[in-house]
Image (spheres, rainbow, N blue to C red):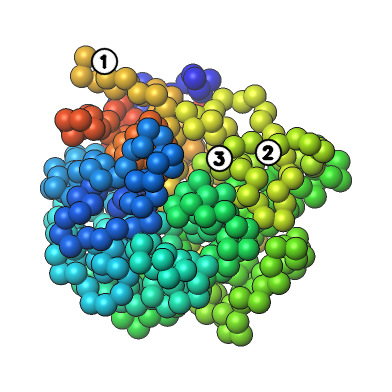
């Protein structure tokens, strides 16, 4: 589908006065371990929940797995060279828990840590700031077998694992993110079951969300001692939630989904409490008995930065008797206690994921976090789009993705102009990769990957982004 926005010429920012970003703005790109590394059975790595899930019939499109993915494990140096050619100032990557600590317990795996040590060293040698994420959904299978994130002990195991990584990389990595998108881990993994580990229980999803945040807080406390010079944060995926009309039913539907999508995590992490209305909404799902004394103080341990992943907006309406919710991330069981809320499509342009394109929503989201929750520096730690890409004469001219980035970077600049302390932007994703349950059927990358030959082709969006970085800005509109 074509985006109605008209992007600037590929690789060229026109001669109008530039829309300049603040000095030192951190321009980056992001990936995740299971989506790109491959080498699933090499170097002492054991299975994660995503290995098990993707090898289970019917869980992923066409049975795709991350066994090979982009083969980044063997192509580390070539991929860092591509980052340097793009002029990236930072690279956000995740560490594979079962590669570093097979089975989720015991000592570190030296061979697994060596991979990340080499990655960090090569990034630094190329002037690229490493931005490390400790957890991007690859829970060791043994910990899932012991109860997974709904089990309280998993939070403690996560803190132990964080110290193993800190011991190896704390002298070279400045920026540390504990969790990536705990909403997805909890509500897609344990609620709807469309993500690993594929369980479908609303109470489990709520417990998982709490223990993910508890693990985050315990890890922050541990890292604060182990790497006192580090900048510590968490990354949450946030959505503006808009009622389909001003009717009381639609307004209440928006309140309910906002509570589950956004405030479930923002309030405990940044305010040290669950919202009262959320607790009331979930009364038929859980009594919150899994919340122990002291948990919320641990969860709200002070941070240095907050990461925001933004892709789209939710527009919702009051229930209609007999009407079924929409599939996948709008699935009924993603929203325990609010399963009957309807998600409304507006007929606006969408990406290949069927996600509505809504750049103003990024401004709204960033302003809300800053104005309602915190003065901490914010970073857009993921923002991007999937479109159908074709290689023609050795090139990939992804004009829709380029326009998407252009619109959302303008939104980022607008947020900065409104007083938001936005300090950086990470494009999702550096490479086409294994897109979770969608397998290899959805492409988000600025760099095209031929999965059979493992060749890489920088797309038009990559060349354009390199010029944005070089200029530290965009052409004014």
- Depicted 158 relative to depicted 209: above or below: below
Tell me which residue sits at (86%, 46%) in the image.
Answer: 248
- Give me the C-alpha separation between circle 3 and circle 2: 10 Å
- Of residues 426 and 219, the one drawn nearer to the viewer in this rendering: 219
Tell me which residue sits at (52%, 79%) in the image.
Answer: 298
Judge depth for marks 2 and 1 and give the one in front.
2
SS assignment at label 3: helix
Q: Position of residue 279 (x, y in %)?
A: 72, 67
**Can you identify the residue that label 1 sits on?**
392
Q: Where is residue 463 in the image (x, y as percent from the top left)?
A: 28, 31
Q: Which residue lies furthest to the right in this view?
A: 248
- Of residues 256 and 235, the one drawn nearer to the viewer in this rendering: 256
Tell me which residue sits at (66%, 30%) in the image.
Answer: 345
Q: Is residue 399 visible?
A: yes
SS assignment at label 2: loop
SS assignment at label 1: loop
- Depicted 363 relative to depicted 208: above or below: above
Q: Can residue 240 be seen in this view?
A: no
- Contact? badges 2 and 1 (CB < 8 Å): no
Disc number placed over residue 328 in the picture, else none: 3
Q: What is the crowding at mark 3: few (fewer than 14 residues within 10 Å), some, or many (at least 20)?
A: some
- 155 with respect to 127 (left or right): right
Q: What is the crowding at mark 2: few (fewer than 14 residues within 10 Å), some, or many (at least 20)?
A: some
Q: Position of residue 462 (x, y in %)?
A: 30, 33
- Of residues 389 and 100, the one drawn nearer to the viewer in this rendering: 100
Q: What is the crowding at mark 1: few (fewer than 14 residues within 10 Å), some, or many (at least 20)?
A: few
- Give me the C-alpha separation between circle 1 and circle 3: 32 Å
- Contact? badges 1 and 3 (CB < 8 Å): no
Mark 1 or mark 3: name the one nearer the start of the chain. 3
**Can you identify the residue that label 2 sits on?**
325
Q: Which residue lies furthest to the front in this view?
A: 57
């Amino acid at each position: 589908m074509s985006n109605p926005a008209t992007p600037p010429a590929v690789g060229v920012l026109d001669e109008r006065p530039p829309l300049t970003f603040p000095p030192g703005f951190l321009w980056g790109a992001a990936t995740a371990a299971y989506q790109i590394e491959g080498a699933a059975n090499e170097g002492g790595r054991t299975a994660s929940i995503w290995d098990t899930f993707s090898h289970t019939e019917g869980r992923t499109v066409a049975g795709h797995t991350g066994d090979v993915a982009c083969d980044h494990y063997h192509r580390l140096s070539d991929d860092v060279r591509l980052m340097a050619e793009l002029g990236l100032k930072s690279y956000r990557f995740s560490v594979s828990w079962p590669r570093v600590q097979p089975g989720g317990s015991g000592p570190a795996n030296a061979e697994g840590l060596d991979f990340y040590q080499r990655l960090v060293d090569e990034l630094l040698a190329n002037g690229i700031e490493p931005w490390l994420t400790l957890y991007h959904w690859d829970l060791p299978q043994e910990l899932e077998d012991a109860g997974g994130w709904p089990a309280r002990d998993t939070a403690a195991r996560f803190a132990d694992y964080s110290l193993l990584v800190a011991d190896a990389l704390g002298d070279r990595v400045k920026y540390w993110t504990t969790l990536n998108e705990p909403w997805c881990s909890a509500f897609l993994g344990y609620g709807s079951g469309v993500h690993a580990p594929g369980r479908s229980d609303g109470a489990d999803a709520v417990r998982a969300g709490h223990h993910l945040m508890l693990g985050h807080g315990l890890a922050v406390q541990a890292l604060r001692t182990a790497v006192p010079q580090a900048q510590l944060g968490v990354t949450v995926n946030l959505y503006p939630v808009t009622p389909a009309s001003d009717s009381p039913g639609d307004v209440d539907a928006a309140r309910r989904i906002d509570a589950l999508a956004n405030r479930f995590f923002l309030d405990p992490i940044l305010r040290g409490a669950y919202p009262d209305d959320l607790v009331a909404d979930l009364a038929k799902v859980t009594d919150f008995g899994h919340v122990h004394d002291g948990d919320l103080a641990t969860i709200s341990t002070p941070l240095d930065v907050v990461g925001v992943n933004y892709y789209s907006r939710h527009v919702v309406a009051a229930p209609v008797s007999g009407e079924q919710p929409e599939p996948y991330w709008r699935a009924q069981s993603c929203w325990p206690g609010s399963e009957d809320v309807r998600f409304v499509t507006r007929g606006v342009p969408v990406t290949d994921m069927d996600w509505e394109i809504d750049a103003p929503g990024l401004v709204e989201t960033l302003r809300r976090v800053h104005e309602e929750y915190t003065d901490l520096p914010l970073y857009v730690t993921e923002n991007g789009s999937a479109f159908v890409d074709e290689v023609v004469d050795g090139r990939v001219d992804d004009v829709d993705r380029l326009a998407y980035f252009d619109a959302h970077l303008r939104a980022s600049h607008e947020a900065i102009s409104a007083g938001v302390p936005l300090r950086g932007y990470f494009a999702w994703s550096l490479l086409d990769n294994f897109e979770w349950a969608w397998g290899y059927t959805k492409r988000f990358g600025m760099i095209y990957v031929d999965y059979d030959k493992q060749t890489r082709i920088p797309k038009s969006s990559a060349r354009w982004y390199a010029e944005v970085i070089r200029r530290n800005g965009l052409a004014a509109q």
